[in-house]
Amino acid sequence: MSRFFDFSHLRGDVFGGLTAGVVALPLALAFGEASGAGPIAGVYGAILVGFFAALFGGTPSQISGPTGPMIVVFAGVFASLSGDVTMIFATVILAGVFQILFGVLGFGQYIRLVPYPVVSGFMSGIGCIIIALQLARLFGHEPEGGGTIPALLEVPTAMADPNYSAVGISLLTLAIVFAWPAQWGKYLPSPLVALIVGTLVSMGIDGVPILGAIPTGLPSFIMPSVSGDAFLIMMEAALILAILGAIDSLLTSLVADNMTRTRHDSNRELIGQGVGNMAAGFFGGIPGAGATMRTVVNIRTGGVTKLSGVIHALLLLAVVLVLAPLASQIPHAVLAGILVKVGYDIVDFSYLKRAHKGPRFDLVLMVMVLSLTVFVDLITAVAAGVVIAAIAYVKQVSDAQLALAAGDVDNLSQGLSDREVALLDECGDHLTYFDFGGPLSFGAAADLGHHVRERLSPQHHVALALDFGRVPFMDVSALRAIETIAQDAAHAGKHLFVCGINDAVAQSLDGMGVSDYLPAETRFDTRFEALSAAKEWIFENIPTDDIDRRDDQSKKPITT
């Protein structure tokens, strides 16, 4: 037991777990209803994902269960597979397997590298989708078909022919979840208040659509199945669920770290989430991930260790076994109002309010990802966002590296010793010295040869020194750029001097055949040795009168 549980914070964990369970109940019912699998599937998902992710995960205080982003994708899976539960929950199991593989292969550290504008865009897009899917339900109508567009197209019809009883319940629910005082929420969360009050009021009103009969008792085992025709759909959906759940969980883990001053284990957390989602798939629970709001509630009310997550799941299990018949009276409008608040909270308003003051590109990227999320699909949005952000970053790094190569950066002699600066001064404009300054990105490599050619004057520059002292590695693009520079120097009759090549770079140069253009007599271990050799060669091969004119201010050494 000590391997899984730490009882040193038992009181806080019990209180935190119970409070998180109370908060999770209305959300689990709402997410289950929105997914198409039914409210009980939402509760089963909260129980199974919450229990196993807490038991095997790497963030002790995290509470896991159905989340808005996961439900958006799962609802699409439910619709595309025509409600076939054996294939639908097989997809959830596959998603869990993918997450376990992510953790075993150490992908946790890479998933966290998704740029913030991309995360903000798809989270805000998911918030918009959740709200769009509930708008017609606020008026007592059910959208025909799945997806954002059919849900939006149903809104005018719903507004033209509203169920006034459902509208009244919706307005009451929205008023409670948006206006409930924050200090009261510490003791009685607004979704639970809205659930209880909305249900009690609806019992005295005729014509309010309600959930109806809900199964009670323990979940039954579902034997997964795979259809050849639907295999690609299942694999794509499982991958999307796995990636989205991983990102959602690890972002919540970062929030937990900031609150508890601890450090989570990303890869172990992915394994725990994968085990939880596999369990949910085998027993008819909807998939889940780390839930930020429930995690924050757990921590603020004393939850510290994974025992709090287990207690949260056990409370929900007790509710299923005892209170399921009462849940059948919950109106659809109440759950729709709760989900509208969930969607609103997911939208990144804190960034949107300040986005115009930040980099313009980041705002454009965020809006693009948001639009693709809402009107195309999540995997396209994230993939496009990451690729464009990566290209933009490479462009920024490349511009900085090319500015260095072009001599547009001040203090280019910074890092040189006095003796090295003196050697450069003595060589005058006959020597061009290039310090690459760090790893060469493939973006900079494309134009590096061009910039070197621009800096080499046909009349004066007779020697070229390349300093690799701060280049830890090189990719193929950079290697080809160095090959081009060496070839151009040889064709132009410039003498080449190279220094600071480490073993990894040397191996890459040899492997790609670039060493043929950098013979041994041109290579030196240190910068001082290379500059000294360059000075000796210049003084031996350049007329004395030309060297004596080095004091001319127009003929200072080119250092880039």
Image: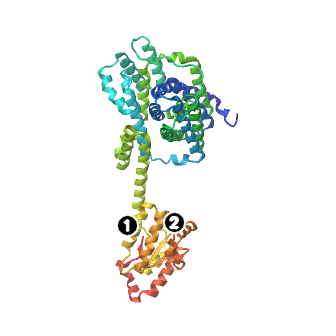
Q: How is the image coloured?
A: rainbow
Dividing the picture into quadrants, the one containing residue 379 is top left
Q: Say if residue 7 shows up in the picture.
A: yes
Q: Which residue is mark 2?
A: 470
Q: Label 2: few (<14), some or many (≥20) within 10 Å?
A: some
Q: Mark 1 — residue? A: 408
What residue occupies the far left of the structure in this picture? 160
x, y percentage for residue 144? 37, 26
At 47% from the left edge and 79% from the top edge, which residue is drawn? 423
Pinpoint residue 409: horizontal percent, then vertical percent: 39, 65
Residue sticking out furthest to the bottom = 544
In this rendered view, identify the residue nearer to me: 475 or 124.
475
Give the residue drawn at x 41%, y 89%.
544
Q: Is 551 on the left or on the right of 229, as rendered?
A: left
Label 2 residue SS? loop
Q: Are there few (<14), some (14-19), or many (20+) residues within 10 Å of tag 1?
A: few
Q: Nearer the viewer, mark 2 or mark 1?
A: 2
Checking the image for residue 200, the label placed there is none
Q: Which residue is most to the right?
A: 1
Instruction: Tell me how far mark 2 sits from mark 1, CA to CA.
Output: 19 Å
State the quadrant of the C terminus: bottom left
* Between discs 2 and 1, the one toward the N terminus: 1
Please, what is the three-letter code of the amino acid marked with disc 2?
Answer: Arg
